[in-house]
Image (tube, coloured by chain):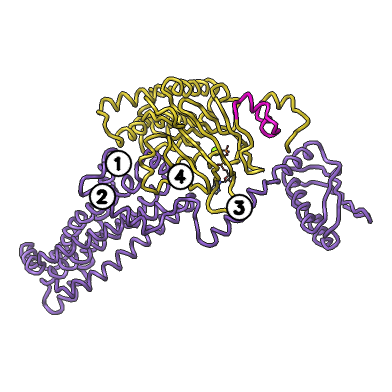
């Protein structure tokens, strides 16, 4: 896959997010951009608005202010006409998986392929098999979502999100609730796809230690101040001037620094 | 418990596992006037047994006091209770942003706005549906993967038994009521006309419509509503699958297509029911009965019935899916959506039937 190099996969500018037309947005002034091949993490405490930010970036929630550009094209909400064309560029792994419950895992992965068109039935079958095997569920193509565990559903949802080889993937808590082995395997898969296919990944997590190994940069959202507190590589964030950010790294739990430059 | 002025201390004692003991509750009720706006400390040292209800009580008491510029401090806490209270205190402090947002949201809900989601109003839905229907007839809507076969089967084939039963009994009832009256004038054979016309023009479409509203509209609303709750509809959108084209269109087409078929089936079964009554009570032959009926029921009556069924089917499918697409994303919301789907579908069917009657009368059909 080839991308015009200067275009970032995601560029977020002065974004304010929230639910509805509240007078005060949940978080505002969000500013970052993600290059193709990069793995970008959005971290923060539970309930700070990470999922909200992700849903805003993919057009499921209206932006309260600012802009979101995906490969240089302005993001619009799902009910606008241009959204269909934008979805060709990205895919989403939702926090709960959101598999279509009346279809088997195989059919879940196949549906995006069938609707996009241009795949022969055999190709569809091969692709479904391949994607499910990538997440370790090759033998479960005929199972329904209610017949598998929560972690398996998450993996199946990842297989579905990868079905069309999106150049940009949004993941909401991809590994929470998975055992360490499966989680590492999933991280490796995402890292592999990013490095060899140039896919960009935006990962939402409340646990950077878990995905820290693969993430190139991260943004920290803070609900108390309603801002994006810090942004940078995991190593830089671990030395952040903000105590709330440092707390995210286990070593700081064990050895908290007493003085905080910023409350 | 005792109170020493000027620095009041309330000493709690006894068993607090079943909530506030009755005597303590009485004491607080009687002395609440003195507690307002004071700084009070609580000594829990003598409490024999406690659980989460004591934690809740202490927090509530402190919140009450703080509301009137008083305060509550505690001492003599068992270690576990102290830790629980500390954690509950920390959890109570919500960020000002979130609290403000919450209040604003309540206001917007009160004003009837549910703006957090891209608004889904009935007219937008109708517009979308009509556009999808038009595009469908020009072959521009991809049908792959939408499960048309299963939806048609669910709506049509699985509806047959109940339609058969209701129609048969409708025919029998009309037959009985009619034949008794007609026999008085020696005109029993005209029961064939009565049952035939009543079934073909009125009862078959109405019964089919109402059965579809109860079975199918409810099922559509519940299915689509649940899919919205679990985020499956959002997932469709992310794969640029338009939920109206993918979920609503097949269902509306299925009812619109199956309703006339069920209606024809229903009319024949109902006529059969009337015939059974007539033949068992009077001794005319089946041939006579059918001849009489055919002479009375014109082809136009038949088409009126089919037209009605088509309209009722569209109304059923439309209202079922509409209420599925706009219900609240909660379990109770889906329940309410289902109810609303059935009620509005039945109402719409009856209103449409009345309009049909007027129209047919005007057009001499
Ligand atoms: N549908 C909604 N309507 C209104 N407010 C909501 C809605 N969903 C979430 N919120 C609010 O938005 C805030 C952020 O929620 P969000 O789901 O984005 O958190 P999160 O950072 O993803 O948390 P977690 O790590 O637990 O998934 C929460 O405080 C919540 O109260
Ligand atoms: Mg979340």
Q: Measure how far apart labels 3 and 2 are at the Cα level.
A: 42 Å
* Distance (Cα) linking label 2 and label 4: 29 Å
Quadrant assignment, res A223: top right
- CB contact under 8 Å: marks 4 and 1: no
Give the colour in which the image draws chain B: purple
Foreground mark, 4 or 1, reads: 4
Q: Mark 2 and mark 4 in contact? Answer it, CB < 8 Å.
A: no
Which badge, 3 or 2, comes first in the chain's sequence? 3
* Closer to viewer: mark 3 or mark 2: 3
Q: Which residue is mark 1?
A: B146
The answer to whether residue A134 is left or right of residue A23 is: left
What numbered label is drawn on residue B120? none
Circle 2 residue: B254
**Chain for mark 3?**
B
Q: In the rendered image, which quarter contains the C terminus of chain A? A: top right
User: In the picture shown, does residue A15 fall above or below B302?
Assistant: above
Measure the alpha-carbon separation of dots 3 and 1.
Answer: 39 Å
The residue segment tinted magenta is: A232-249
Nearer-the-camera pick, B280 or B157: B157
Does mark 3's beta carbon lie closer than 8 Å to ligand 1?
yes
Residue nearer the viewer, B309 or A60: A60
Disc nearest the viewer among 2 and 4:
4
Residue drawn at point x = 76 percent, y = 46 percent: B54
């Amino acid at each position: 896959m080839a991308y015009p190099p200067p275009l970032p996969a995601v560029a977020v500018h002065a974004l304010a997010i929230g639910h509805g037309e509240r007078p005060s947005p949940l978080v505002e002034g969000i500013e970052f951009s993600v290059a193709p091949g990069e793995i970008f993490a959005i971290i923060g405490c539970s309930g700070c608005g990470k999922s909200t930010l992700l849903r805003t970036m993919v057009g499921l929630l209206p932006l309260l202010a600012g802009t979101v550009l995906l490969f240089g094209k302005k993001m619009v909400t799902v009910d606008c006409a241009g959204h269909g064309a934008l979805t060709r560029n990205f895919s989403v792994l939702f926090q709960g998986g959101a598999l279509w419950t009346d279809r088997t895992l195989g059919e879940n992965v196949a549906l995006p392929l069938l609707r996009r068109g241009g795949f022969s039935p055999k190709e569809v079958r091969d692709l479904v098999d391949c994607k499910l095997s990538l997440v370790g569920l090759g033998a479960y193509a005929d199972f329904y979502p209610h017949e598998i565990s929560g972690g398996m559903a998450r993996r199946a949802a990842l297989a579905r999100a990868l079905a069309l080889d999106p150049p940009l993937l949004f993941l909401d808590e991809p590994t929470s609730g998975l055992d360490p082995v499966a989680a590492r395997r999933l991280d490796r898969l995402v890292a592999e796809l990013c490095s060899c296919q140039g896919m960009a990944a935006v990962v939402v997590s409340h646990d950077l230690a878990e995905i820290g190994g693969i993430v190139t940069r991260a943004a920290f959202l803070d609900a108390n101040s309603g801002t994006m507190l810090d942004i940078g590589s995991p190593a830089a964030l671990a030395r952040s001037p903000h105590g709330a950010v440092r707390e995210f790294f286990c070593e700081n739990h064990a050895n908290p620094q007493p003085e905080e430059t910023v409350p | 418990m005792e109170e020493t002025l000027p620095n009041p201390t309330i000493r709690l004692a006894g068993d607090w596992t079943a909530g506030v003991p009755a005597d303590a509750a009485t004491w607080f009720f009687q002395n609440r006037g003195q507690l307002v706006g004071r700084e009070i400390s609580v000594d829990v040292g003598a409490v024999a047994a406690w659980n989460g209800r004591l934690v809740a009580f202490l927090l509530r008491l402190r919140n009450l006091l703080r509301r009137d510029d008083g305060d509550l401090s505690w001492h003599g806490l068992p270690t576990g209770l102290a830790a629980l209270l500390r954690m509950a205190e920390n959890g109570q402090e919500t960020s000002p942003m979130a609290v403000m947002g919450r209040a604003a949201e309540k206001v917007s809900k009160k004003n009837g706005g549910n703006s957090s989601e891209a608004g889904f109003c009935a007219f937008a839905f109708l517009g979308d549906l009509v556009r999808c229907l038009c595009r469908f007839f020009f072959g521009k809507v991809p049908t792959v993967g939408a499960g048309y076969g299963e939806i048609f089967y669910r709506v049509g084939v699985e509806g047959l038994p109940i339609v058969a039963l209701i129609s048969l009994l409708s025919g029998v009832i009309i037959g009985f009521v009619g034949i008794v009256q007609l026999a008085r004038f020696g005109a029993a054979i005209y029961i064939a006309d009565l049952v035939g016309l009543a079934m073909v023009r009125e009862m078959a479409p109405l019964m089919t419509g109402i059965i579809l509203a109860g079975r199918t509209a409810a099922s559509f609303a519940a299915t689509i509503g649940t899919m919205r709750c679990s985020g499956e509809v959002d997932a469709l959108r992310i794969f640029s699958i338009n939920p109206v084209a993918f979920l609503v269109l097949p269902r509306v087409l299925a009812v619109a297509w199956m309703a006339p078929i069920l209606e024809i089936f229903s009319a024949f079964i109902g006529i059969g029911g009337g015939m059974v009554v007539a033949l068992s009570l009077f001794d005319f032959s089946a041939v006579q009965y059918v001849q009489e009926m055919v002479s009375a029921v014109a082809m136009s009556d038949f088409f009126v019935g089919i037209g009605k069924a088509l309209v009722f089917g569209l109304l059923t499918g439309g209202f079922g899916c509409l209420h599925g697409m706009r219900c609240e994303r909660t379990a109770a919301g889906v329940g309410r959506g289902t109810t609303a789907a059935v009620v509005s579908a039945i109402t719409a069917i009856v209103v449409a039937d009345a309009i049909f009657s007027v129209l047919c009368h005007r057009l001499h059909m």
